[in-house]
Image (tube, rainbow, N blue to C red):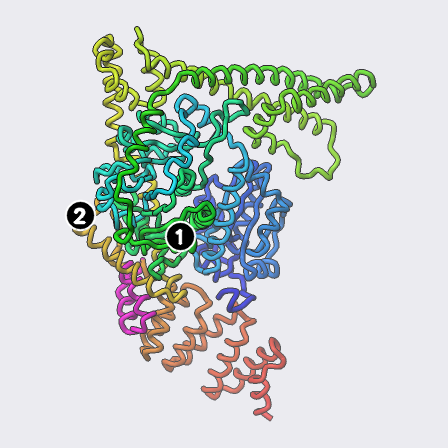
Amino acid sequence: MSERQAQFEQYQVSKFDDPYLYSVNRNVFEKNSAKIIFDNFYDKRLWDEDYFYIILGCDSGLLTNYVLEHGLAKGSRYLFIDSEHVLENLKNQLSFTDWHDNVAFATLSTWEVEAEKFNLQAYMYTDNVRYIKSLAANDGFDDYYYQANTEISLKLETQQHYTMVSLYRSPFVIKQIINLADNLNPMIALKDKFKGMDCIILGGGPSLDEIIDKLNSLENKVVIIAVSRIAKRLLSENISPHFVISVDPHEVSFDVSKEMLEMADESIFLHSTYVVPVLLGQWRGVSFHDGLRVPWPSELSKDNTHLAGPTVTNSAISAAVDFGFKRIFLSGVDLCYSSDGNTHAKGSNEAKVGPVLGKREQWVQTYSGKMAETMLTFIHATQTIEDQAKQALKKGAQLYNLSPNAAKIDSILLANFDDINFTKEDLISPIINKIKNKYSKISTQQFTDVTNDIDRLVDEFDEITAIVEQAIIDNSNLYKTYDNELENANIKQRIDEAEETLNTTYKETSTFLKKYGIHRFIRIARTDGDLEWSDEEMEEVGRAYYQCFIDNINELKPLLTAAKKKIELRIKETQPQLDYHEIFQLWRSEHHFGRAHHWKIKNPELYQELNDIDKKELDTQIDEYFKVLENTDTYHLKRTQEQSSLTGINRKAVYMFNAKNSDGLASLVENLKKLEYNQKHNKNTLQKHENLDQLILLCSGYLALLQGHYQEALDKFYLLDEQHLSEDELIQISVLEIDLNHYQQAENSLKKLAELTPAYQPQYATILKLNKKMTEAESVYLGYLEQQSHDIKVWLALANLYLENNAIAPAKEAFEKVKILDPSNIEAQQFFDSLQ
């Protein structure tokens, strides 16, 4: 039952006294109490303070009640989004003994309005929004939750991205400060250097495999820009891209990109100012950064290229357009899964682990006209890449995708690699060599300039600290001087003057501090501004406001001190030293072991002159560098293995069946069979899946159903074991058995369903009646009506059963029940008319 079938649905009560809607949760709450289930499932994910919880589904109201009974986390708000069917039944049949103004319900069409009332944007600024799915949304017994999840997730992801890029975010600023010694050349130096030429952007998608063996034939006829995550694959194919690009500040980026460090002699590194430091800090080649030289207001920050986001592919396209390329070809930029379910090209952790089959995803059209599965993040990236392609056209650049199996984007044309007329001349090498020669040597003047600017900024920090510390004292005294008007006026004047100084003399630095730590400033903002504030509350808000400046400064100053020290040691690296201990210790503290390898290659004579202690430390670091490069047991691999679970295949098969997606089901069956084959022949040792044979039978059964092969479908379902025979399969089995006139078998199937829930008792009684088991049918009808006395259809069925047995008296009683529920019921009226 769903909202498309009936708006009203009687609540059932579990043996643990938990009321639930069967269509939403089935028999989940018959296995354990709601509290125990929720405690185990959510653990501590619902109780962080100052968070906005957006929760898809309320589990028939039980999850909402669980939150209310537990008690809300301080400063947190909870918005439950559910179907009209659930909310209407909840409203009419249940009530909560306690309520809280920081809890609200919404439908898919109203949740954004309700979220705005709860000040969602303020929580977005602090990155304190948590999207959680209820048990019902995870189980997906009703397709509503799948569709709702797609829409909500995409909107939240988009809003969160634009919120983050519109502000100075402290994690990005911190990474940029750490990188100050290694952000060396502004990318604007490359603007229009390749005007009118061709480039190929290599992403990590499966279609990279379609052309990778042809890339070496280009011989500098086209510029290759590769995302960093495919470095290992390119090295294995002896392909050296002209540029390799990375923008991700997160540590996991190093896990998938570390092999690019071995490309430093051939390739140029394009990166964001905040790229993960352990990658940038070990790069020994030429590199260019986007964005501002320093993250604070400074004369050092000149105009520069700003790479688009949110993905590295967006950034690569942005750079290609800025560099002046006229034709920009994409390979491995699929934005969808391959036909065998893989998300990435060979050589990646994702390809090693195997296809993503257990998740229910979206479907998009490819250039070939076929439908392909895709994930939410790919959909988001598709939208932003389409916008980039349109902007590129305005600048005279056309984007092409080289794969017919990539998601189709209207502004990006399909091109066949073999049909492209690339230039016959090598126009690229001279440009690349000129760039390398010019930017391989770094002037130490920029280090001096940055160091001096850090000193200037720290001096301003100290002056601002003095101002706000006095303001905190004055703010505290202000509310103790009401009896002395003159003193009160003087304190107010000093506070006003402090604020004026912050907004004039130190305006730029003050604004930087506010943007850097905006999460702190936002937390002191009151959402109940229409209420009258007490003196204590006003004093606390004033104190907290000035304390935010101090907290931000205290967080930044040690980072700036460390950045200065790193710059000093970077300079020393280029000069002979009597003692290298301090330099080597810095490398070790940051895990920049690759610098040791580079230093030894560049300074063979100095290496021989090292004392024994320094030489041993250097050699140890070089060993560790190669161990890191060779290590495959990374966090990213473990995460990928977890995400490739086949959990959810059964629900996915049901969803595809309901959506009449026979192509998707056929692909799912084929990919499961490939997994089974590879597993049997030890072709995939990274991930082992159990019960593949059962999953193949289940999916094959639904595929046969869609194809009209009913006996074949029934045979497949009959082979399923109890673990894989869920309610959905029992429903299909019973329907097939009835359609094929297998009434005795249908009786057994419907009996199992009736034992699962009373909702199937009427169908079970009907099949008993067809099998001439009238007494048993009557008993089942009566048992059902004891719980669902409002069900008119079942009263009519019972009445007709009595009539067929010539039992007029009980038939009359049944029809009388019908008349009470529906006085105008025609069938009941005809019965009473026949008695006259």
User: Is 171 positioned to the left or the right of 238 in the image?
Assistant: right
Q: Which is nearer the N-term, disc 1 or disc 2?
A: 1
Q: Position of residue 610 (x, y in %)?
A: 24, 9
Residue 476's tag is none
Label 1 sits on a secondary structure element that is: loop
Residue occupying the point 20% across, 51% down: 678
Residue occupying the point 18% across, 52% down: 680
Residue occupying the point 39% across, 23% down: 182
Disc count in the image? 2
| Residue 459, placed above or below residue 400 | above
Q: Which residues are magenta?
A: 695-723
Task: Work out whether residue 622 or residue 828 is closer to the camera in this orientation and state it.
Answer: 622
Q: Position of residue 333 (x, y in %)?
A: 35, 48
Q: Amino acid at mark 1?
A: Ile
User: Is 740 positioned to the left or the right of 168 in the image?
Assistant: left
| Residue 350, placed above or below residue 596 | below
Residue highlighted by disc 2: 682
Q: Position of residue 443 (x, y in %)?
A: 39, 18
Residue 36 visible within the image: no
Residue highlighted by disc 1: 412
Residue 633 visible within the image: yes
**Magenta span includes 600:** no
